[in-house]
Amino acid sequence: MSTQYLVLLGMLALTCSLALASDASPLQDFCVAAKNILAVLVNGLACEDPKLAQADDFFFTGLDKPGNTSNPLGSKVTPVNVVQIPGLNTLGISMARIDFAPYGLNPPHTHPRATEILTILEGTLYVGFVTSNPDNRLITKVLQKGDVFVFPVGLIHFQRNAGYGNAVAIAALSSQNPGVITIANAVFGSNPPISDDILAKAFQVDKKVVDYLQSVF
């Protein structure tokens, strides 16, 4: 009997941990992120008095404007999350516009707190994600205007312009603050740097290669 009880508790604990794997559900109509409460540490942002909420707390403009892609990657992400719209606080959603110059790349990255669903508005994109260990399968697709693709939460993924003109996509994410970890920046541009001994062994390359990559990032 005691063994069955322990198994039941274990299953309940696992169920609870899965239920908390995304942004918590709101307990009121909305929770506009407070602008002046900087010292309060919560899992999310502290709330303004709802009686003070204004329309601008739920508003963003400019997503129709192309992002500046004149950079080495040839892409620009315009986020619309809780930073831009305080009224998104606790609501568990956000979005972004992604612009691509010809051959532009949104490099391999992850969103630690969100699944992403991508819709192509213009152009052609080659997209993909890599499954977790031990398989590390690369799953890819060429997307045209009107196509939709999903990147599961936490998995490394990328998008590259596969056409000859500009491309535009809209991403929706299942978190008010999905976060982004760009793999190359995190590994070779950390502050302070990761030891080149560690990276040389991890990537099975000479330390000079690691030193060069760290100098770039």
Image (spheres, rainbow, N blue to C red):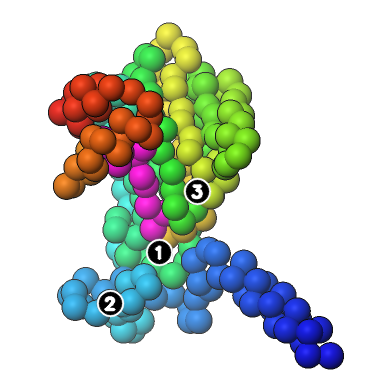
Q: Give the residue displayed 19% in from the left and 27% down from the top.
A: 211
Question: Which class describes the residues within 10 Å of circle 2: few (<14), some (14-19), or many (20+)?
Answer: few
Q: Give the residue displayed 46% in from the left and 28% down from the top.
A: 159
Closer to the N terminus: mark 1 or mark 3?
A: 1
Residue bearing the label numbered 3 = 154
Q: Give the residue displayed 29% in from the left and 58% down from the top.
A: 83
Question: Which class describes the residues within 10 Å of circle 3: few (<14), some (14-19), or many (20+)?
Answer: some
Q: Under tag 1, what secondary structure?
A: helix
Q: Is residue 116 left or right of residue 57?
A: right
Q: CA distance from mark 2 to mark 3?
A: 24 Å
Q: Which residue appears farthest toward the top when viewing the image? A: 164
Residue contact between numbered discs 2 and 1, judged by CB atoms under 8 Å: no
Question: Amino acid under label 2?
Answer: Leu
Please report the bounds of the magenta region as a residue range: 177-188
Question: Amino acid under label 3?
Answer: Gly
Which mark is nearer the camera, 1 or 3? 3
| Closer to the camera in the image, 133 or 36 | 133
| Res. 88 mark | 1
Location of residue 164 (image quadrant)? top left
Q: Position of residue 200 (x, y in %)?
A: 31, 30
Q: Under tag 2, what secondary structure?
A: loop
Which mark is nearer the camera, 2 or 3? 3
Question: Which class describes the residues within 10 Å of circle 1: few (<14), some (14-19), or many (20+)?
Answer: many
